[in-house]
Image (tube, grey):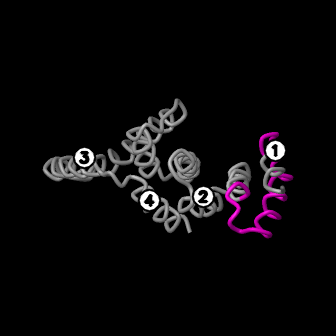
Amino acid sequence: SLALLAFAHRKLKHFEEANNKAKKALERNPGNRLAREVHADCLVADKDWAGALRELNLLTTVFQDTALARVWLKAAVCLYNLGQYHRVWDITSTLIENDYSNGYVEELYHLSEGHAKAEVEATMGNLTWTQRLFSKLFDKVLLNVFRRSRHFLDSLRKQMQLAIQEVE
């Protein structure tokens, strides 16, 4: 099938050929998950982060568990390259907390954490000490509520949709 050919070309890093095959497969069957994921990977290879996010978003409603975690990791890479460090930090921390972790997820988590904290520190410099205190206390409460949520996949879907809206 065209989707399998696209997948094979992607594995060989022949992204142009992979993308052509994936697009043809999607023309024949827009619901082809493999072709859609290959197409998203090719967009990542072309550094079209917003386009890749749009494609990956279409997969979030059809994939479950490990496959969905893989899609979220790819989305986190796109968001990181778009400078959406807080969203990447949220996504990767959720993946880690739910045992969808590997060295790459953890590295992305730490990189995004550093950028996100630097952004917060830059913003916090303009606040009074009482404003900073209440802000930090409130953030910890929200973070604990988020971490305890059993609906982490729904949370990730909402984050993806918000990120796509911000990018567009």
Q: Earlier in the sequence, mark 4 or mark 1?
A: 1
- Residue 56, which numbered label? 2
Determine contact: label 4, label 3, CB under 8 Å. no
Let me know if residue 9 is in the magenta part. yes
* Amino acid type at image mark 1: Ala
Q: Nearer the viewer, residue 30 or 168?
A: 30
The image position of residue 107, as x and y in percent, is 50, 33
Q: Quadrant of the N terminus?
A: bottom right
**Front: mark 1 or 2:** 1
Q: Which residue is drawn at the image coordinates 44% and 48% (left, top)?
A: 91
| Type of amino acid at the residue the image marks with label 4 | Gln
Whichever of labels 4 and 2 marks the residue nearer the N terminus, that label is 2
Whole-percent x, y for residue 98 in the image: 40, 41
Magenta residues, start to end: 8-35
N-term-proximal mark, 1 vs 3:
1
Q: Which residue is mark 1?
A: 8
Residues 125 and 15: in front is: 15
Distance from label 3 to label 2 (Cα)? 28 Å
**Label 4: element kind:** helix
